[in-house]
């Protein structure tokens, strides 16, 4: 079974896109006076991101356990 190859860093174009989206949404929130809604939406995105990270870590754990079990 081939091992999973995971990237360790976020590519630069995605970093630029993320910062542009965050900056634009913050500017819009400040202009429309919905700053609490912006904080809420950022919190939701961060929690979804943490969920994705936890699922990927669990996947890596399962792959490692399967690799150990195959060796025995």
Image (tube, rainbow, N blue to C red):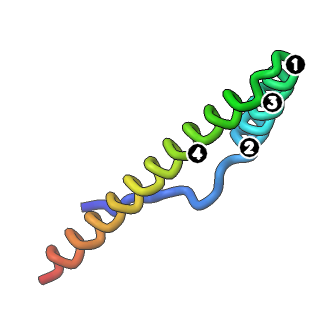
In terms of secondary structure, where does tag 1 sit?
A: helix
Q: Is residue 53 above or below residue 44?
A: below
Write down the residue under mark 3.
26
| Number of the label disc, if any, that sits on residue 46 | 4
Asked if the residue under mark 2 is in contact with the one under mark 1, i.e. CB atoms within 8 Å, the reply is: no
Left or right of residue 37: residue 28: right
Q: CA distance from mark 1 to mark 3?
A: 9 Å
Whichever of callouts 1 and 4 sits on the residue coming sooner in the sequence is: 1
Write down the residue under mark 2.
15
Q: CA distance from mark 4 to mark 2?
A: 15 Å
Left or right of residue 64: residue 55: right
Determine crowd level at label 1: few under 14, some 14-19, many 20+ residues with C-alpha closer than 10 A. Answer: few
Instruction: Residue at 57% x, 38% y: name it.
Output: 45
Instruction: Residue at 52% x, 46% y: name it.
Output: 47
**Mark toward the viewer: 3 or 2:** 3
Instruction: Residue at 23% x, 72% y: name it.
Output: 65
Query: Picture coordinates of residue 27 (x, y %)?
Result: 86, 26
Determine crowd level at label 4: few under 14, some 14-19, many 20+ residues with C-alpha closer than 10 A. Answer: few
């Amino acid at each position: 079974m081939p091992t999973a190859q995971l990237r360790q860093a976020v590519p630069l174009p995605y970093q630029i896109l993320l910062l542009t989206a965050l900056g634009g949404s913050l500017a819009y929130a400040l202009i429309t006076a919905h700053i609490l809604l912006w904080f809420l939406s950022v919190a939701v995105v961060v929690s979804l991101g943490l969920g994705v990270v936890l699922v990927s870590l669990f996947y890596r754990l399962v792959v490692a356990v399967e690799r150990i079990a195959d060796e025995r």
